[in-house]
Amino acid sequence: MERFTLNQKEWQRYQVITLLLEGRCNTQEAATTIGISERQTIRLKKKVQNQGVKGVIHGNQRRNTGRGLSEEVKDQISALAQHKYRGFNDTHLWEKLTEVEGFLLSRETLRKILREKSLPPARKRRPPKHRRRRPPRPQEGMLIQVDGSPHDWLEGRGHWLCLVGAIDDATGRVLWARFFPAETSEAYMHLIRGIITRYGIPLAFYSDRHSIFYVTRKEWTLEEELAGRQQPTQVGQVLERLGIELILANSPQAKGRVERLWNTFQDRLVSELRLAGVETLEEANRVLERFLEDYNRRFCHPALEPQSAFRKVPRGLDIDRAISFTYQATVGNDNTVRVKGRVFDIPPGQNRCSYARAKVMVHRLLNEEWRIYYQDRLLLRIPPGEDASKAVYGEKRESPIDKRKVCLASKPLSPKG
């Protein structure tokens, strides 16, 4: 027995023509109900009398239009989706097929082909939930959301990596991102340096309550009780020196923009890394650099206000010193300083022959250079990769890092790339 599938329109026509055949309505009433002319209604009545339910089905249904894709082309697309572009979502796959492979088809046509070939979507979409979203900031640089995403980015071809990045709240632009072996304070210092050297100093950072940003210990030291606050983390000290406000989120949903960014990257970027056959950290960062340009071109949008809130870096600010690991230490009676398992000899100065019991500030720069300051005087500098015996001595007076000067920096910068 032959079976037919009718849509809503065909089913309505069949019911009205059945009433017409049974004499329960006339031709004019049937034509008005269906929305066609009386002449066409008479033709439709004869077809139903001769063919039954098949008479209401359009004759071109399931007939090849001659403009559709051939089965050979559909098989090529199916093979690419299962092998070369395995794991790509439908939209990402459509972009590759049209821009790289040269196919001419629409996004919806691709979806139909994949479903016909029993290829389900790469990601299952959850039904939307009602949430009250925080409106984005009106200007670029007012709020930067930062986070890290540890993930099997290489899908077993190499070690797990952590992608550390920052997204502008106003434009959705990914300002900076890089792969690291783990989510560390040094990684976020590289992030801060990358942003301010390219765009300027933003007003605020928005992060989770990771111990890199937030002091998790409950006990206060005597110095902290006297100061009335806990000593910030290393990253927190860098932000204070640059005059950047740190806002801590109370839940992952609060920083939803960067969380959604990781969802997109774990879909699209993982596929791009697989396509390039990436196996190492260095290769992953090279692919990431090209990926960010394409991502910002596709998904970045203008801010509500054209002005930029990024501030210029104050003249005379030593960025290397400002973005560094800082330790306060006391010089021993033998004029040595012990920090992080290293011992530094402090030479006699021009104004004093001994620095015993003096409080000094020790800085470890991102390039592994060490510097020791006493009252903003540079006492000792050890270049990267050198031991303390090759230290550079001197008492050059340097300008102190004044947070107020950073906060009151000159006019905001215009938006950059």
Image: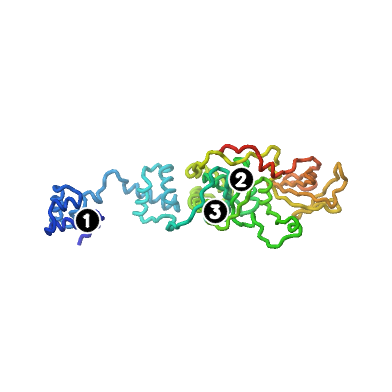
Indicate which label's residue lies in the foreground, 3 or 2: 2
Q: Classify mark 2: helix, strand or loop.
A: loop
Q: Earlier in the sequence, mark 3 or mark 1?
A: 1
Residue visible at 85% across and 49% down in the picture: 355
- Place residue 341 in its image quadrant: bottom right
Seen in the image, is 391 located left or right of residue 165? right
Q: Quadrant of residue 380?
A: top right
Q: Secondary structure at mark 1?
A: helix
- Of the numbered discs 1 and 2, the one sitting upstream in the chain is 1
Q: CA distance from mark 3 to mark 1?
A: 50 Å
**Around disc 3, counting alpha carbons within 10 Å, would you say few (fewer than 14), some (14 to 19), or many (20 or more)?**
many
Q: What x and y, as percent, mark residue 162?
A: 58, 53
Can residue 173 be seen in the rendering of this structure?
no
Instruction: Return the disc, 3 or 2, that comes first in the chain's sequence.
Output: 2
Q: Which residue is mark 3?
A: 255
What's the residue at 72%, 44% (across, down)? 401
- Amino acid type at mark 3: Lys
The three-letter amino acid code for the residue at tag 2 is Leu
Residue 150, picture quadrant: bottom right
Label 1, on which residue? 12
Q: Which amino acid does the dot numbered 1 rest on?
A: Gln
What residue is drawn where x is 55% and y is 43%? Answer: 139
Quadrant assignment for the C terminus:
top right
- Tally the numbered discs: 3
Mark 3, secondary structure of its residue? helix
- Residue receiving disc 2: 203
Q: x and y percent of residue 307 in the render?
A: 55, 39
